[in-house]
Every structure is written in structure tokens, then in C-alpha cells.
Amino acid sequence: MKNQKKKRRCFFLLVFLVTLLLSPSLARQTDYAPYFYDNGPSSTNGNMALFSISEDTEVGTQLYILNGTDPEGDAVWFGLTFEKGTREYLRVDPKSGNITLIQELDREKQGEILAFVSITDGRNKVIETIRVFVTDANDEQPEFQNLPFTVDVPEDTAAGISIYRVQAVDKDMGSGGSVNYYLLGTTTTRFTIDGHSGVLRIKPGETLDYETTATHFVIVVAKDGGGQYKGKHQVLTSTATITINVLDAQDTPPAFVGTPYFGYVYEVSLPGSEISTVFAKDGDEGNPNPIHYSITNGSEGVFTINSTSGCISLTAYPVTLRNELYEIQVKATEMGQSEELLDYYTMTVVTVRVVDLNNHPPTFYGENGPQSQFEVTMYEHPPEGEILRGLKITVNDSDQGANAKFKLRLVGPGRVLRVVPQTVLNEAQVTVIVEDSAAIDYEKGKSLTYKLLAVEIDTPERFSATADIVIHLLDTNDNTPRFTSEYYIARIPENSPGGSNVVSVTANDPDSGLWGEVKYSIYGSRYDLFLIHPSSGIIYTQAWAILDAEVKSKYNFYVKAEDTEGKYSLAEVFVTVLDINDHVPEFDDSRVERTMVIGAPVKVEAIDADAGSPNNIIEYSIMQAEPDNIFDINSETGEINLKSYIKSMEIVQNITKQKDCRWSLVVQARDRGSPSFSTTAVVNIDITEATQVNGPMADFLLQSRDNPMKALGMVAGVISILVGITVLISTATFLRNTKSNRIMPARRIVIRRRPPRDRKPWTFNVPFRGSGNDSSNKFIVGDQEAGSVNVNLNNKGGPRCSRSKSKPTPPRAPCLPPPSCPPPSSNPRPSERPRHWAAVPTVSEGLTSTGSRTSSQSREINISSDTSRIPVSSALVSELKMRLEQKIIESNSSYY
């Protein structure tokens, strides 16, 4: 037994050890499923248990985050599915667990979303069922029930009684689902509505009247209690129209229709004839009662009325009637269902007149009896107010009284003629009078036709009669010939032979016969070159006329169109003589002499005597040159230039072997006309160079050598400018001196006169010299000590080019003359002071400015750089000071 116990213990110990050894590997082989976090309904992450969302949430909004974990720490993925056949409102990101709204929500259609969320680690998957609740937003309008709203209300319904109840339903919840009612336009409507129940009533103090308004239209508004929608408070309303038909009640008396009533008894009327008919209807049109008619007064036993139809009839012959006018009072009374007369009635008066029978219409008569057409012949444009005496018209109506009264009227072109009289009783003589003389025009129409109309005024038959009035017009010379244009423009070449047609003018005279014939002539005698055919109006040139555009290219004159009685009109004719190319360009001479300074052009000019372009536009070209390829010419101006590479005389001398610098070329001048003409001239050009002539003045003189008037004008301009400046300076000095209040002495510098041996003669070297008429001495630059250059520009034998070996020195300024020095006097008088060392100031000197004195002093000091001062004793200075003060006092007294 003990051995068995030991064996059992050993066995259990062995099993325990094996279990301990195997437990880690078993643990590693166990795999647990992932799970969601349950964070409660108020959380935005977890397993989405009891989650709710508002129905106004925007599509694309992130709603929730699925959150969970795996016990082994492995990555998890999330899923979201729906039942088959249901709309999928949500979508989940498998990795992040973000749930997004993908479709709009509508709580009224689906208040709860059933879905399945899942979490998996790739091996194990956990699925949970969720319910997402859709909360309400105020997005639904109140909706009226049982539309349309129509109600019938008797007009005698008392105020405050309920006549209808409207109902509207709002599908929203809470305050957004509550509905209140009110009416639009409460100030004008006769109704009121209970805001909570929707009961419609007649407003207190108001009544309904079928006869005034048979139908009322009331607009009712249903408004919810408001609520949140997309973050804002929103109140929604709906409207509906209530149609209220007012039912008629018996409360209005009858009324006659078509008043006032009239009747007529004629001389041929018989007893029983219908005179007039009255008609009345019940004022309660919704449920009218039948009407009973009766005569209450005024019939005098000769008239009767049908009680049902209201027809009034004659009961006696007209000859027995004693009055011409009867006023019959007729009564209309409502009858009940038992044909009893009710208390609702009305009265009217029927006026009956006994009249003559209107059985004769108006009739027009001429000299031989009744007539329907009247004719007259007259000249056009008669004076206004004239009577058409050729018309003999009489109008007559054989009836009596009002039956014989009628109006006369002319039917035709308005306000041309008028008829007198316009109102006729029985018979009248008709007169036609002219109102618009200008409208009676033979040229507009050879005849006028009117209808004379006579229409009765006060008769029911309105009998009428018409007659035609035909007016034949005779023509008069009342029109002036008129040209078709106020002016005519013509063009004719200058080489046209005599008798050539220029232009044709036309004038029209609408008069007939001889009065319409037009004769043409040229008005005035200024232009004898032209003639006009008197009948056709063709303007042509005289047989001897020669038109030359260069002499005169524009002509204008007047032409006259005249009829046989001398009535005329004028038109102006403008004739332009067209230039043709009939002149050849011409140079002044066939051989042209020019002198060219290198760098400056020379110009040739030809003249074309043609009048206009392009015939007188000239183009220049070089046809031949010796040597060739030396010159360029401007085709428009004729300026000839050396080639750009020729800049000095050395280049010129290298081009030609001739010692002289004289070249020749043939220049052609061609016009632009068609055909084109040309001419040529030989141009001899002397080439020269003025190297020592520098500065703008020299350039100007060179450029103006062929135009001396230009240089003269330049000199005159410079002199004018200098004179103007001098006048301005003098005026300014005078004005400044007149404003000075004190005369100051002018300070002078006493200088010593230079010994005679130190004196130098005055010398002034003129840079340009010339003498006589020799053009070769025109430009000479020279100096006594330096070399000189003499350029002769006009020597036809060729340029003489001589050069000096040394450059000329610039001219020197002339020296000032030495001051005179008379012998001193022992006692000089004031008037005999030595002027070379102390000058007595004058008035003008005393008025000079400090700057002027300073400048004067500086000029006196700089007269000679080697001048030395002489000593002056103090006694001499004192005496000089005293005399100066005395002179100043004398000058001031004379000045003031």
C-alpha cells in the first residue's frame, strides 16, 4: 500500500512538472478576439451605443469614431454594414474608425438607423448591432388638411358665430410641431380666427351683404412654434386661402333696369300698340322672387300694362289723346311662393310722347329738282373764306317739328372746305366756304370730291341723305422751278477741247402747259468760259475756252431756272479743273555750280509747273557721276551728300588722281505723274574743307553761304536782343536809383601811372579777315606770329589747299589805355580836381548799388598787375574828405 501511495505521488508530481513545462507554449497558442470600448451614449468614440444625431446635420460631417483594441495588441480594423434593402446613411474608415454622414437625414421619414459595427484583428471578428437615433430639427412647415377651404355662409349670419374650422399639422416635435393661426389683412377683412383652434368667425360688429360682396377670400397663416435648424432659430409658416361664399337672403327690394323709360305714340298708331316695356328684378339675386307690374297713376285710361311682362300698350286712337306728353307711374312688387304680394317694391316713371310720324328723309335739290351730284369748276388756291358760288344746293325735310331737324356735314379731306349752315330745320340753302387755300392745289389733284351728308338729329330712325360735290380745278402758275440739288459739283480735265460737256443740271416746275416749261441760263457774267443749253440744262465750255489747272483750277458760278412768267430759282455749280501731267520738271540751269564743304550737303532744285500732286511731286536721282559711287542724293529734297566714309580731303584726294577737287554728276528730276516726265542737269561740285573754322558760328556761316539773307537775319536778331537787354538794364537801374534816399560817394582807387616804357600798344587780332569782293578771302583765320590757312571756296579753277606748319594762337584781349596824369596843382579848385586819383561822384554814381561799386573797384584794381600805389599825406586826405562832403551837400540840395 505504501508503495502504491508513493507511486501515485510520484505520478502526480510528474504530471504537475509536465504541466508546468507545457504551460508557456499553451499560453502562446491562445488567441483572444478584439473588442469595442463602451464609453457611454454621451461619448463620441467607442462602439456607438445609443448614439443620436440631428436630422439637419450636413452631409460629409464626421459623426463618431469607432474605438476598440485587441488583447494581443494586434492592429484592428472597423466595419459598418446595414440590412439589405435599407438606405446606407453612414460610412466608416476601416483604419481610423471615423464615421461620416453620406446622405441627408429626415426624422419624419426615418427616426432610427439600424446598423452593424464590427472590429477585427484579421483572425477574429466581433459584430455588434447599434441603433442611431435621429433627433428632430425644425425643418417641416405646417401642412393644411382638407384643402381647398370653401364655406357657404348666409348673409344674415350673426357676428361671432363659428362658420368654419381650419386645421394644419406640423410633423416636427416639440415647439416646432405646435401650430398657431392668424389671418392676413385683419384690418380689411370681416372675419377673425382663433389662434389655437383655427375656428373662423365673423368679426364682432361686421355683417355680410350678398348684394355688396358675394364672395370673400381670406388668407389664413399657420405658424409653428419655431426651433433650431442648422444652428439657427427658425420659424416656418404656411398659407391657405379660404373661399367664403355669401348666400343671398330676402332682404332687398326689386330694382328697375334700363331707366329712364320713354315711349312714343305716332299718328298711325292703333289701339293695342306696344308703347314701351319696363323690367325690374329682385335685389336678392341669389334667390329672386317673381315681379308683379302695375300702373298707379298718369295713364288717364288710355294706357295699360301687362302685370307679368311689364309691357305698356295703347288702348285708344291717337286722335283721341288730349295731351302731347304723359308721365305714367309704374310699380314693381315682389310676389311670394303663393303669389301673394310682399312688402318689397319699387317705383319708376315712363314718359310717353305723342309725336308726328317721321316718314320723310332729308332731300337735296338743285336748280332742276332733286339731285345727288353737284359740280363746279374753279382755279386752284382760291382765297380763304371765298364762297363756291357755282354750287346751287337746297336741302329739305318734309316732316314737322323734331322729325325735320337734321345736321349737315362735308365728308372728305379735312379742314379744306366747310358747309354752312351745320344745323337745319325743315329747309335751308347750302353754302360751301374755302378754309384752306393751300390744300386746293392743281398739282396734287385735278379735282376734289366731297360727300355732303344730311343726318336727322332727334329721331329714332336717323334718316339721312348724301350728295356728291365734285370740284374741277384749273391750273395757275403758282410754282417756281426748283433744281434737283442746291449745288452741283463737276470735274473736267484741263486738256478738254472747247465745247466739252461739264455737267447737266435739272430743274422741275410742276405747273402745266407753258408755265411748266423751264429755261436755263448762267446767272451773272463773271465766267464766260462756260455756256448752258437753255432747254436741256447741259453746261459745256466755250469753243475757244482753254482750261489750264496751273492758271486756275476752281470755278464756281450760279445757274438760273426760269419759267415763262419770270419765276426762277438758282443753284450753284462748282467746277474743278483736273490737273494732267503736261509740264516737265525744270532746273534753273542745265549746268549747276555748287561748292560743298565736307560734312555739309548741297542742294539742287527743280520746279514742276503742274497744279497738283502727284504731277508736281519731283523725285531726284543721280544718273551719272564721275567718279562713281561718291555721292548720295535725297530723292525728295534734292540734297546731295558725300558718302558717309568720306570725312576729309585726304580721302577725296585718294579717290581721284586729279589735283583739283571738282567733280561732276548728272542729276535727274522726274515727276510722279502719268505719264511721267523728267529732265537732267549737270551739277559741278567743288569739294573743300575748312578745318580751322570751328564753333557754332562758323558752322552757321558755312551753312548759310548760299543764303546770305539767312546770315543777315541772324545778325539783325542778335542786335535786337542786345538792344532789348540794354533797355531792360537801363530801366531797372533808373527805377532802383529813383528809390534811393541817400547819395553815397563812390570810392575810387588811386593808382600810379605806368611809365611810358612799360606801355604796350593795343592789339586786337581779328580771327576772320576778308577784303574786297574776292570770295576766296571769305574765310581766313590767321595771326601775325602763327601760320594761317586760306580756303577759297568759290574758285572755279579748283580748291587751293594750303596748310600752315604751326597752330594759330587764340586771340588776346586788348589792353586798357593808361590813365592820363596831369601835373598836380598846389591849390586845386573843386572843379579842377585830378580825375585820375579821386573823382567827384555824380548823382547817378551815388545811386549805384554796393555790388556795382565793388565790381567797379575790382575792375580798377585789375587794370594793371604791376601798378603800385603812391603815398598820400594825411593833410591831403583831410582836404579831400572836406571837399567831398561839401560836394555831397550841394548835390543833395540840388537833387531834392
Image: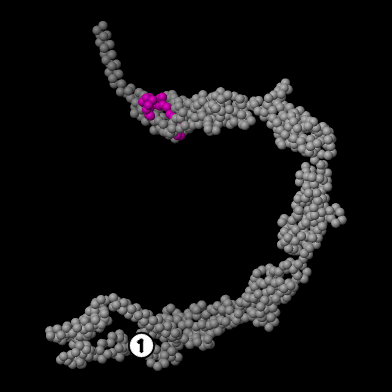
The residue shown at (45%, 27%) is 175
**Is residue 101 depicted above or below 879 in this figure?**
above
Q: Can residue 264 be seen in the rendering of this structure?
A: no
- Toward which corner of the image does residue 770 lie, by quadrant? bottom left
Please, is residue 612 above or below residue 291 in the view? below
Picture quarter containing residue 100? top left
Q: Is 507 inside the magenta-drawn segment?
A: no
Left or right of 850: which side holds 389? right
Q: Quadrant of the N terminus?
A: top left
Image coordinates of residue 498 in percent, x first then y, are: 68, 81
Which residue corresponds to the image point at 33% horizontal and 78% vertical from the top-left?
731
Q: Amino acid at mark 1?
A: Phe
> What residue is drawn where x is 29% and y is 77%?
738
Residue 800: x and y, percent? 40, 90
The location of residue 788, given as percent across then percent down, is 34, 89
* Depth check, front residue: 280 or 499: 280
Please give the residue where the numbered disc 1 appears in the rendered image. Answer: 768
- Start-end of magenta stretch: 33-59
Quadrant of the snapshot with the C terminus: bottom left
Taking depth in this image into account, of 64 and 9 the one nearest to the observer is: 64
Q: Is residue 207 visible?
A: yes
Instruction: Look at the numbered disc 1 and give the secondary structure of its residue.
Output: loop
The answer to which of 180 and 569 lies nearer the viewer is 569
Q: Residue at x 28, y 87 (%)?
A: 814
Horizontal side of 760 relative to 719 (left or right) equals left
Q: Nearer the viewer, residue 108 or 186?
A: 186
Q: Residue furthest right?
A: 368
Instruction: Please state if 333 lies on the left or on the right of 210 as rendered.
Output: right
